[in-house]
Image (cartoon, rainbow, N blue to C red):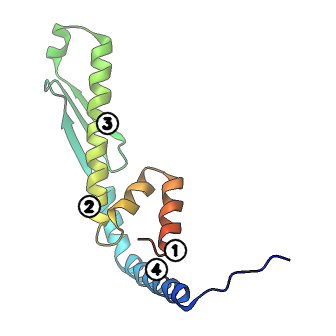
Amino acid sequence: MEQFKPVDAADVAGMRAYADELRTTFMRLQDEASAVHEEARAIQVTEKSPDGLISVTVGARGDLIRLDIDPRIYRKPDARQLADSIADTVHRAAAKAQERVIELFEPLIPGDQMKVHLEGDLQGVLEQMASQLLGKR
């Protein structure tokens, strides 16, 4: 039969401290998150292409809200370049929107944690949790 390693007092104290921190964070989230969430949902970012002919507006999740294309774009018709420019502009706007959401939640959730959550990085979330549980902040 396999023997279990005894847990020392330092491990227990660290786990208790982390549990207390989680409880405090949870209480703050309950109190403040609703208002912050509404503010985050209202985030919109507008970005222009380097040549200024394309303008995009995205929401907090990077979803395209508005796309404006200057008619001068047709002077040099190049569908591939137009598509690439639109995609690049949307990506830059989405990245800025994500930065704003992270900044908004910073008082409640550390930026690095919020970033991995927003990116859907399950492995990153699990690694952060394991690190915190093991006291390796």
Q: CA distance from mark 4 to mark 3?
A: 34 Å
- The vertical placement of 129 against 75, above or below, is below
First reached walking from the N terminus: tag 3 or tag 1: 3
Q: On the image, numbered disc 1 is attached to which residue?
A: 134
Q: Residues within 10 Å of mark 4 (few under 14, many from 20)?
A: few
First reached walking from the N terminus: tag 4 or tag 2: 4
| Type of amino acid under label 1 | Leu
Q: On the image, numbered disc 2 is attached to which residue?
A: 103
| Type of amino acid under label 3 | His
Q: CA distance from mark 1 to mark 4?
A: 14 Å
Q: Quadrant of the N terminus?
A: bottom right
Q: On the image, numbered disc 3 is attached to which residue?
A: 91
Left or right: 119 in relation to 47: right
- Per the rendering, the mark at residue 22 is 4
In the foreground, 84 or 61 = 84
Q: Residue at x 28, y 49 (%)?
A: 97
Q: Residue at x 73, y 80 (%)?
A: 4
First reached walking from the N terminus: tag 1 or tag 4: 4
Q: Residue at x 29, y 26 (%)?
A: 86
- The vertical placement of 95 against 38, above or below, is above
Q: Residues within 10 Å of mark 2 (few under 14, many from 20)?
A: some
Question: Where residue 36 sits: x, y (%)?
Answer: 31, 68
Whether the residues at callouts 4 and 2 have beta carbons within 8 Å, the answer is: no
Q: Quadrant of residue 65?
A: top left
Q: CA distance from mark 4 to mark 2?
A: 20 Å
| Type of amino acid under label 4 | Leu
Q: Residues within 10 Å of mark 3 (few under 14, many from 20)?
A: some
Q: Secondary structure at mark 4?
A: helix
Question: Where residue 88 sits: x, y (%)?
Answer: 29, 30
First reached walking from the N terminus: tag 4 or tag 3: 4
Q: CA distance from mark 1 to mark 2?
A: 27 Å
| Type of amino acid under label 2 | Glu
